[in-house]
């Protein structure tokens, strides 16, 4: 439930804001419309007076080709189309060199539009841009002549294509010259590489074959094995000699020594047999022992001979092994030197091959560049020539008028808001309640000059809007204090000219018409406006009554035409405030309270004098009369602050309301009744 009420309140507040905006436009439309019309007229005048400009555009296609770069120079390279290359082409199109050729070709220096500063003016008239995500450049030229704009756009595009072709041909010629110099240098370098390779091969000599190296290694191994075998035999032979071993212990030493060993064994066996039969002195035994001794000497001699032979073989084997090792070391050292020579040889061969390859590639490129110098296809071409425009591009009539309309509306709103700020008077009930904190009791419309006076309109046209307004105002005053309806009512204003006297007389006449015994007191002892209204300025009145020179019956008279009693101001007096503050004034007010149903007191403005401030303490209620949309709000607020008792202020009455304008502040902005009041319900001419 609370959410629903909150939403309704929000919608109602938004609706009020929209209505307020609509009402603002409704009442302030003259400055808004005037400023808008002036802006539109200014825009139309600008369109008539401005020199039209025409825009023509041509489109260039920048074609992508394969990269044909040569070395680090890359003179003929075609980079893929990207943002940087397109920016470079755009910069070339806008360059002074290219535009100067167009100026000379088109003789723009003699043209009235371009003149002596043709180059700068052409650059200002030129716009170059890349079409989005494409290798297309759009050249746009603006001129006062449509044909000239198209001609210049095509001329700039042609100049760029020619410049691009000339640049590439010049690059090809420079590349050809550079390649010629490069070929001479590469030829010298290649010859130097070949000569260095040949000289190294001649100086290095033949290398040791691999088979020969293998044979020497095998021979060294055999020599080392023989040396080891001879050493072993010699050591074994020496052990046999030292311990008297048998010759059979030494393998490979058969022959005479073995035979001697067998002979010695046989002799030893015979000696044993003979010793078994004979004595040692027996001649057979002695002869056998002599033969054994000879055999032993023969064996020793044979062993010595064998040992000498083994030593000779060992020495020979050692010499052969040393010779083989020496040869093998020499081959190894030669092999290391060969590796170094081989590495150097490979390096020279690679350098010579690289120089030959570079020379061949450069010669091929030189032939290609020579062909390109004779014929080079274009890589930029015009795909859309400029067309002569039929309508001017500037000023744009629709855009100009829209801008003028927007600016006019903006300035109009500013002027309307300024008028709203300058309107310092009270126009709505909300302003009164917010600024003064008082209720709006009623609104009296401004009547036509041909209509009867407001005081007479009550009888002449009782159903008129003014009459209904007076009755509504009187009812609101009566309802300001329900428990004790006011009988003594003061009408005062903040400044002169608010129509207080008219309202006071009209309320009194309206009350009298309704059957109330009504008295109108003219307490404005300076201007005497109410007395003049009833043509009683020469009659004795309030002054005479208070000073005692006239009786109440002589001072108060009955005005038959309006049916009410009137107490005029009377004669002139030097100190009106002192008289109004006297005890006799208090006595008079108490007396009329008991004699009349309603007493209306017309007083001077609150701002200039203190008279209404003094009377405010003698009456039941004070009604502040304000002229609609005229009296400054600060002035009224200051005047109300001067009144002694704010509780005795019944409220505010708006006077001289211009209904046609007041409706622009809202249908009920100037009326205290939500029902629209009697102004719209009843209307009688």
Image: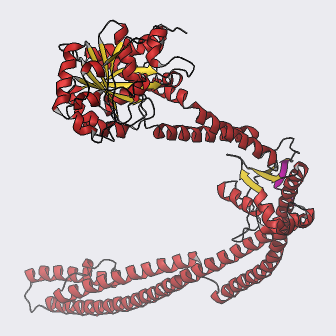
Splitting the image into 4 quarters, where does residue 405 fall?
A: top right
Q: Residue 364, can we see it? A: no
Q: How is the image coloured?
A: secondary structure
The answer to whether 561 is drawn above or below residue 164 in the figure is above
The part of the chain drawn in magenta is 376-383
Q: Is residue 224 above or below residue 109?
A: below
Measured as percent of width and height from the top left, residue 16 is found at 41, 23
Q: Is residue 563 left or right of residue 33?
A: left
Residue 307's spot in the image, x, y percent? 31, 90
**Nearer to us in this view, 628 or 222:** 628
Residue 117, percent from left and from top: 82, 68
Q: Tell whether position 328 is magenta.
A: no
Q: Nearer the viewer, residue 680 or 182?
A: 680
State whether residue 403 is above or below residue 588: below
Q: Left or right of 427: which side holds 645?
A: left
**Is 576 left, or right, of 282 in this rendering?**
right
- Quadrant where the image shows the C terminus: top right
């Amino acid at each position: 439930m609370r959410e629903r009420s909150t939403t309704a309140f929000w919608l109602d507040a938004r609706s009020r804001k929209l209505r307020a905006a609509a009402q603002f436009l409704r009442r302030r439309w003259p400055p808004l419309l005037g400023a808008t019309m002036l802006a539109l007229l200014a825009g139309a005048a600008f369109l008539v007076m401005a020199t039209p400009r025409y825009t023509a555009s041509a489109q260039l296609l920048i074609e992508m080709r394969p990269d044909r770069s040569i070395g680090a120079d890359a003179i003929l390279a075609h980079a893929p189309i990207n943002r940087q290359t397109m920016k470079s082409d755009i910069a070339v199109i806008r360059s002074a060199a290219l535009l100067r050729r167009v100026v000379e070709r088109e003789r723009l220096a003699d043209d009235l539009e371009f003149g002596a500063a043709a180059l700068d003016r052409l650059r200002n008239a030129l716009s170059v841009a890349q079409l989005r995500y494409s290798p297309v450049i759009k050249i746009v030229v603006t001129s006062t002549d449509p044909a000239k704009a198209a001609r210049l756009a095509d001329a700039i595009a042609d100049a760029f294509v020619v410049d691009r072709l000339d640049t590439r041909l010049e690059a090809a010629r420079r590349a050809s010259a550079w390649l010629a110099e490069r070929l001479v240098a590469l030829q010298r370098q290649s010859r130097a590489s070949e000569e260095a390779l040949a000289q190294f091969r001649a100086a290095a000599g033949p290398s040791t074959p691999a088979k020969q190296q293998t044979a020497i290694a095998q021979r060294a191994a055999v020599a080392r094995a023989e040396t080891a075998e001879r050493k072993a035999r010699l050591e074994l032979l020496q052990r046999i000699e030292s311990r008297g071993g048998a010759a059979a212990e030494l393998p490979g030493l058969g022959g005479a020594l073995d035979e001697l060993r067998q002979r010695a064994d046989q002799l030893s066996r015979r000696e044993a047999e003979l010793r078994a039969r004979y004595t040692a002195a027996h001649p057979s035994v002695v002869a056998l022992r002599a033969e054994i001794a000879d055999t032993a000497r023969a064996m020793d001699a044979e062993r010595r001979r064998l040992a000498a032979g083994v030593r000779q073989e060992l020495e020979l084997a050692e010499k052969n092994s040393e010779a083989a090792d020496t040869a093998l070391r020499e081959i190894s050292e030669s092999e290391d030197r060969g590796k170094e020579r081989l590495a150097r040889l490979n390096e020279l061969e690679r350098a010579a091959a690289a120089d030959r390859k570079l020379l061949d590639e450069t010669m091929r490129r030189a032939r290609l560049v020579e062909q390109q110098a004779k014929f080079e296809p274009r890589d930029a071409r015009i795909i859309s020539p400029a067309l002569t425009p039929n309508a001017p591009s500037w000023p744009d009539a629709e855009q100009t008028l829209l801008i003028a309309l927007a600016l006019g509306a903006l300035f109009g709103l500013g002027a309307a808001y300024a008028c709203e700020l300058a309107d310092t008077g009270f126009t709505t009930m909300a302003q009164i309640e917010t600024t003064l904190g008082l209720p709006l009791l009623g609104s009296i419309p401004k009547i036509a000059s041909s209509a009867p006076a407001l005081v007479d309109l009550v009888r002449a046209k009782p159903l008129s809007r003014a009459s209904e307004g007076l009755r509504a105002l009187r009812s609101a005053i009566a309802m300001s204090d329900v428990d004790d309806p006011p009988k003594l009512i003061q009408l005062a204003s903040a400044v002169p000219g608010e129509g207080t006297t008219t309202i006071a007389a009209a309320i009194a006449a309206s009350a009298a018409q309704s059957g109330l015994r009504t008295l109108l007191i003219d307490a404005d002892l300076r201007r005497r406006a109410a007395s003049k209204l009833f043509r009683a300025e020469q009659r004795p009145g309030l002054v005479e009554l208070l000073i005692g020179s006239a009786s109440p019956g002589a001072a108060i008279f009955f005005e038959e035409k309006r049916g009410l009693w009137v107490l005029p101001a009377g004669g002139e007096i030097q100190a009106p405030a002192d008289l109004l503050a006297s005890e006799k004034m208090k006595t008079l007010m108490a007396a009329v309270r008991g004699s009349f149903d309603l007493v209306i007191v017309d007083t001077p403005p609150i701002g200039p004098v203190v008279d209404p401030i003094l009377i405010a303490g003698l009456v039941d209620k004070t009604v502040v009369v304000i002229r609609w949309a005229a009296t400054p709000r600060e002035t009224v607020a200051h005047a109300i602050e001067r009144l002694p008792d704010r509780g005795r202020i019944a409220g505010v009455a708006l006077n001289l309301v211009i209904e046609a304008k007041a409706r622009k502040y809202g249908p009920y902005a100037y009326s205290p009744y939500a029902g629209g009041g009697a102004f719209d319900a009843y209307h009688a001419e």
